[in-house]
Amino acid sequence: MKTYLSIACIIVTILNFQSCTQTDEVPLEQQATFDLIQDKILTTNCAVSGCHASEQDPSFIEHGLILTKGNAYANLLNKTPKNISAREDGLKLVTPGSATKSLLYQKLLYDYGHANHSGKTYGSVMPLGSDLLSNGHINYVLQWIQGGAPETGNVAEVSLLSDKTPSQATFSPLPKPVVGAGFQMTLGPFEVYPFFEREFFLHKELGNAAPVYVNRYQIRMRPGSHHFILYGFRNDTRPPMNTIRDLRNQNGSLNFATFASMQNHIFNFGGSESIEDYTFPDGTAVELPANATFDMNSHYFNKGDKSTTGEVNINLYTVPREKVTKVLKVLDLGNTNLNIPPKQRTVQTRNFTFDKDVKIVMLFSHTHKLGEKFEILIKGGSRDGQVVYTSANWEHPEKINYGQPLTIKAGEGLTSRITYNNFTDKTVRFGLTSDDEMGIIFGYYYEE
């Protein structure tokens, strides 16, 4: 009896082995294009912890997209993206037959010619913090979409999967503004260490001998960036010039001197897109004093095992004073009294009142990864409670321009109403690191 059982087990084992071997040896040409996209691209680059693997990933609040095997196809095909710019431009996550209308394809491209449709961008190039896909893999996705994006069948050249040519072209710096039309400030190139979140500051001069009026700014960054900001200062205390001040040491510990200097910052210009080009409303501009200096703040992720390179350019374009009818000031309204309990959603509100009549021309928001929804409401007057701003994207918050400025009378103001989803097991409070939280209304306004 034992002999027969042993022989039976051996036979079953051999059959199972042959079955597995035969499956593994199915030629790529005979496998469905989407199955290969799932196995060779999505599973290895996208459906990983922290990104598109589950609803427990911190970034799920932002994108709402799961790309694991068995879920990805249904979650992609003809689905409306959360990114407002992409939605306004008529994109779906995947639009069968049209790669230009498919956000999945656009998010893989480093090429600025593709990424800057109609003056807009659709968030960071993917995979964030990791090596970009090869040209072959990107073109394989392209052919699948152009071939109708079927769930079964083969519509792309399998040989593309063997093309490992890097898609990341040489970084193309922004051309400098012509003399008299603006200024350029640069960071880098600089190293972003393996498995590291690098954020640092560099205090630099703008180079303006007289007051200037900025009515447009452009930003260009290498991929992997979370944000770039030009900070001004609340008081005359200034950090040393031209010295990089990292927020974290290479062992991950905080640099407390840098941390302390952040308390004196006030936002001036910046954003979270790899490519950004923003123009203020006609006749308006931000005044900068003579000999202006900024604390340049760059924040990069590197999720791979090799060092990557960061680099940032920003152009500030200026106009003559006589062309400026309204001088803009910066809104920087933050709720520092945050107390976000663990394992639940909570709504935190804060009122801000103006002591003068103001007109607001643009608003945007800032939270960290727990920020699920950011609303700004009018406080006081006949429009009390009116929602004038909504963003559900903490990493790439919407910038809303008001062609007809929002008029806020003295004694009235704005309310920040933020929904936080604290999926962690600890109470989170206001703070300056990515493990803390924030709730800030940014924007631009002028006084009546």
Image (spheres, grey):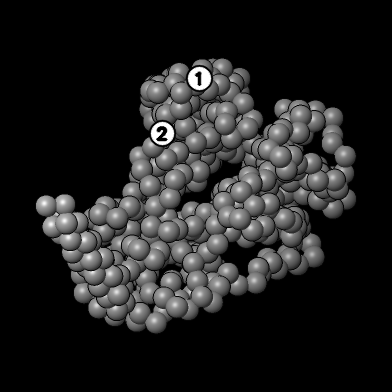
What kind of element bears circle 1?
loop
**Cα–Cα gap, marks 2 and 1:** 19 Å
What amino acid is labelled 1 in the image?
Answer: Thr
Write the residue at 21% across / 74% down: 153
Residue closer to the observer: 3 or 107? 3
Q: Which quadrant holds the C terminus?
A: top right
Residue sitting nearer the eye, 139 or 371: 139
Residue 225 % position (x, y)? 60, 52
**Res. 373 mark:** 2
SS at mark 2 in the image: strand
Could you tell which of marks 2 and 1 lies nearer the N-terminus?
A: 2
**Picture residue at 43% right of the left edge, 59% below the top:** 44
- Give whichever of 379, 187 is nearer the camera: 187
Reading the image, the residue beneath label 1 is 427
Category of crowding for the residue at label 2, using alpha-carbon neighbours closer than 10 angstroms: few (below 14), some (14–19), many (at least 20):
many
Please indicate, yes or no, whether residue 261 appears anywhere in the rendered image: no
Where residue 143 appears, as percent x and y from the top left, is: 34, 76
**Residue 427 in the figure: left or right of residue 324:** left
Query: In the image, what residue type sits under mark 2?
Result: Lys
Q: Does residue 311 appear left or right of residue 207 in this picture?
A: left
Q: Given this view, does label 2 or label 1 mark the residue nearer the observer?
A: 1
For residue 325, which numbered disc appears in the image? none
Q: Residues within 10 Å of mark 1 (few under 14, many from 20)?
A: few
